[in-house]
Image (cartoon, rainbow, N blue to C red):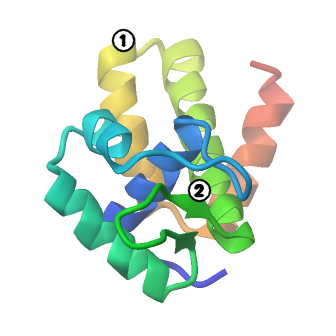
Amino acid sequence: MVKTSMSHEDYLEAIVMLGGTTDVAVRSVDVANKLGVSKASVNKAISALKEQALVVQPHYGDITLTEAGYAYGSSVLGRHRMLFDFLTKAVGIPADVAEDEACQMEHAISDESFEKWEAFVRSLKL
């Protein structure tokens, strides 16, 4: 999978969190609200994601993920959830802090390191 920027990963993750799939579209305004950004920022990011063939959006229409976009966004969300669970359940970090830190960590860890870390966490049966 080709990597995109951390910011664009956040957009893909947000679309998946909002229920977006290859069949279910989400509105730009909902993405903007979810991420706390302007609609103009969403439009700029979606344009870049369209160029990477990760989303489809008719002119000013709703946003639908491509298969690659859905797989990518789901992967980022999965990393986030596992990191959040580890930080809160295994380490005891408060949820609000863990939420922010999981978001930063999900982008920083390599795929290879994440796979090894994920296997370790699964062995803990959290």
Q: Circle 1 sits in a helix, a strand or a loop, which is it? A: loop
Residue at image location 58% in from the left, 45% down from the top: 16
Q: Circle 2 sits in a helix, a strand or a loop, which is it? A: helix
- The answer to whether one can see residue 5 in this image is no
Q: Is residue 57 left or right of residue 64?
A: left
Q: Is residue 54 left or right of residue 60?
A: right
Q: Is residue 62 left or right of residue 125?
A: left
Q: Relative to 103, does residue 70 appear above or below in the rendering? A: below
Q: Is residue 12 left or right of residue 123?
A: left
Q: Looking at the picture, which amino acid does disc 2 mark?
A: Gly
Image coords of residue 85 (percent x, y): 59, 23
Looking at the picture, tell me which residue is in the foreground, 103 or 94.
103
Looking at the picture, tell me which residue is in the foreground, 113 or 76.
76
- Residue holding disc 1: 94
- Residue holding disc 2: 73
Residue at image location 61% in from the left, 37% down from the top: 19
Looking at the picture, tell me which residue is in the foreground, 29 or 9.
29
Please tell me in which quadrant of the rendered image residue 9 appears: bottom left
Q: Looking at the picture, which amino acid does disc 1 mark?
A: Pro
Q: Relative to 37, does residue 3 appear above or below in the rendering? A: below
Image coords of residue 43 (percent x, y): 27, 65
Crowding around mark 2 (Cα neighbors within 10 Å: few <14, some 14 to 19, many 20+) is: many
